[in-house]
Amino acid sequence: MASKWKKTQYPGVRYREHPQRTHNGKPDRYFTIYYKFKGKLHEEALGWSSEGWNAQKASIELGKLKQTHALGEGPATLAEKRKIQEENLAAERHKKEQEEKDSLTFERFFQETYFPQAKANKSEKSYRREEQLFNLWIAPVIGLIPLKDVSPLHLEQLKSNMSKGNRSARSIRYALATIRQVFNMAKYLNLYAGQPPTSSVKFPQEDNRRLRFLSRDEANILLNSLRMKSQQLYEISLLSLKSGARADEIFKLTWGDVDLQRDTLTLWDTKNTKTRIVFLTADVKEMLIQKKRGQNTDLVFPSRDGKKIEQISDTFNRTVNELKLNEGVKDRRMKVVFHTLRHTYASWLVENGESLYTVKELMGHSTLSMTERYAHLSNGALQKAVKRLDANK
């Protein structure tokens, strides 16, 4: 049961005592003030003795309020006063938050927010590449500039610096794409408003379609050379050549994804986020049969410590160089790299007369236009089409 209200020596001030709690050896007292304003009786709570209130302090607060009534200025009640104070505090917080947003530099947001997320959600190769671009090219231009002040002009300067540094159009696009992702994250976190400056900057373009693919003889020589150096690298290369699987798709492959009854492999969460089925050729099936099958969750091609491989062994490039497959080649599109095996798979399919749609599905491309960059390499088919014109003379 609540204690009764008691008057004090100060008019308009009263209190009640807490039934159990004490303060300075006395029951803790809860003070209120009451007064008339515009013909109505008002009573407003102040607080406990343990919170610093006493009768005299309450009387002073009441006096201030009555003075406000007499002058007709300011809040008429404590409730109004508290509301104004809360609004002022909220305005101050908003101002401070806005000042923090306005002063947030690209470098600080990248290092404290964006990059930790990139490390958690992206492959090591990807986030290392972004870190390198940031340190070498992005930070020197916009690192110390607040996000809100980064302009397309700054990004044009970045493009110019990278071009003068003999960086490829692909690297420049990668840097701009990284910047765009940073701004998109800042916008999502309500730390940046408006369109990112990258929306007003033209990304440099280049024809990066690989024109080089292996002949049957070259492929056999390369595979035999790899087999003499590393059985597993040979197997990984054979699988890519005969299925079009990307390196990372092969690295993630588990025995549960291998179905030797149906002659298929299931590739989960591929580059375009889709899952696709790969059909086994006879030599790939035989290679998998010869391997010691593990549990369904075991990797088919684990690293030496049993974990997922992160990148193709340097042995592949050393073997390519030993075979002089890249001798005298300057254009990166004409160089033989591991991805050339996937490219060769598509090219051989087209050379054999398979439709672009069939190749698209086997390669796991999201659009037909992606397949066309491989299909145009079908020089034999194109030559036959032109020669048929002579046949009609």
Image (spheres, helix red, strand yellow):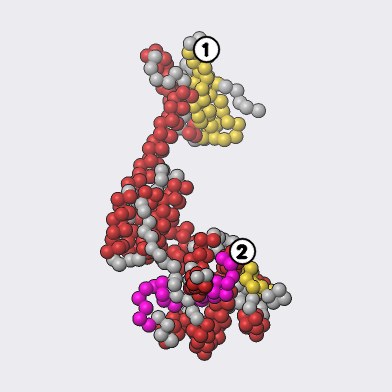
| Residue placed most toward the observer, 95 or 314 | 314
Q: Residue at x 48, y 24 (%)?
A: 79
- Amino acid, disc 2: Thr
For label 2, the residue is: 275
Q: How many neighbours does mark 1 have within 10 angstroms: few (below 14), some (14-19), or many (20 or more)?
A: few
Q: Secondary structure at mark 1?
A: strand
Q: Is residue 338 magenta?
A: yes
Question: Please, what is the three-letter code of the amino acid marked with disc 1?
Answer: Lys
Residue corresponding to mark 1: 40
State whether residue 52 is above or below residue 171.
Answer: above
Residue 200, compared with residue 363, is above or below; it is: above
* Residue name at image x 55 percent, y 77 percent: 241
Q: What quarter of the picture does the N terminus occupy?
A: top right
Q: Secondary structure at mark 2?
A: loop
The image position of residue 172, as x and y in percent, is 36, 61
Part of the protein shown in magenta: 327-356
x and y, in percent, of residue 23 in the image: 51, 35
Residue 175 in view in this figure: no
Residue appearing at x 49%, y 27% in the figure: 46
